[in-house]
Image (cartoon, rainbow, N blue to C red):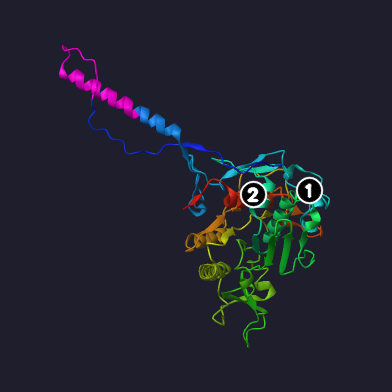
Amino acid sequence: MVNRLKLSSFGHFRPKDLNFGELKHCQTWVFHSFNRVLVIGSLLLLFLVAIGSGYFYNTNSFPQPIVLENAGDNRTNTNFSGECNLFVGNWVPDESYPLYNASECPFAEQGFSCLDNGRKDKEYLKWRWKPRNCEIPRFDVYVILEKLRGKRIVFVGDSLSRTQWESMICILMTGVEDKKSVYEVKGRKITRQIRHLQVRFSSFNFTVEFYRSIFLVQPGSPPKRSPKRIKKALMLDKLDDINKEWIHSDILVFNTGHWWTPTKLFELGWYFQIDGKMKLGMTINGAFNKALTTWHSWIENNINSDRTRVFFRTFEATHWSAGPREKCDVTRQPWSETNGKDKNAFSDMIIDTVKNVAIPVTLLHVTPMGAYRSDAHVGNWSDNPSVPDCSHYCLPGVPDMWNELLFTFLFSEQQYQIH
């Protein structure tokens, strides 16, 4: 199990305004026979020594703040300057993982519990994300539980959001003695279609909630006299009608992306609408960008940043093999290279949107780190093994790391600067 939440310090040189004016009372031993040039040379030597000593002192006396550069500006960042981007790194073996046993967590959905569904190899559970120039702090689950006391945590998005929601509950339950004190408020079971799930940690008086909003914007009926192929209208200029339920939260985490595909939109009769008019020629990327603009406006007009900490997680890498018929080949080990999976147009649009929001929004740029994890998908180890799955991840697994990153931003003693 992981330990305390604290980041390492790094040496850092901060130039200070040094006064190299007159040296008063300088007691330099100079023979009268030396000429003036040698005197000047000696003084210059003293200046150089003073400067060198000051540099050495500063280098070893000031801790360096860990700076998280905006992930949108570091998509190809390979600097070794000592600055820390939590999302640039690699996976390393770690025997202290996994963080929990899915069989002992009633909120780990059966469809994501790969071991319970027959997966035999366990190597995929033993990996930890290691940023290039720093460490993600180990955390004490008891400390996190106390820090969450009285809070309301809300996840909004698609089924990948639900896996992060489940992961957080399972992680936190390892620190709760009375497991029955953690329960779904209305006694609802986790299903794929349910709109709202609310798990209460009664001993600590906080809730962890999930709202299913696969597009973030509002679905509805198409206008009258629309072509027959239009079954549903996705209103890109209106946020999902359950948005009022998200406002009064302390921690608010968004995601979207996996339903923005031709097979899940056009082939099912979903088309785009703006200002009550259908936009039949609009591309999916253009529609996605418009939906993000609507989300952007909603955040600025509805969220009180003094109360609510907002996060947006980028598109989660999938590992379907390319070809006329996609296949799902789950590997035994992570890929050694990203093979282009670290780039995604949806992620780029999310990054650009988040950068321009007037209130603080923290980006969880998980696309590059997920690109390596071809070993961590559900594959055929779901509750429906006849349908392979190279989109969702097993639990325990990659979503646990998303929550460790979330805890880092929320509770680390080290303050991050995102710019």
- SS at badge 1: loop
Report the Cα–Cα distance between label 1 and label 2. 17 Å
Q: Is residue 199 above or below residue 242?
A: above
Near mark 1 (Cα within 10 A), the count class, few <14, some 14-19 or many ≥20, is: some
Which amino acid lies under the numbered mark 1 shown in the image of this protein? Asn
Q: Is residue 210 above or below residue 145?
A: below
Classify the position of the N terminus by image quarter.
top right
Residue at 68% of width from left, 50% of height from top? 400
Question: Percent position (x, y) of residue 166?
Answer: 72, 57
Q: Quadrant of residue 298?
A: bottom right
Question: Percent position (x, y) of residue 121?
Answer: 79, 44
Near mark 2 (Cα within 10 A), the count class, few <14, some 14-19 or many ≥20, is: some
Residue at 83% of width from left, 51% of height from top? 116
Residue range in magenta is 25-51
Q: Earlier in the sequence, mark 1 or mark 2?
A: 1
Q: Which is nearer the eye, 401 or 183?
A: 183
Q: Which is nearer the eye, 148 or 92?
A: 148
Residue bearing mark 2: 404
Point out the residue furthest to the bottom here: 225
The answer to whether 92 appears left or right of 118 in the picture is left
Residue bearing mark 1: 101
The answer to whether 328 appears left or right of 417 in the picture is right
Question: Percent position (x, y) of residue 318?
Answer: 66, 55
Question: Percent position (x, y) of residue 118?
Answer: 83, 50
Task: Inspect the magenta stretch and tell me whether residue 42 lies in it.
Answer: yes
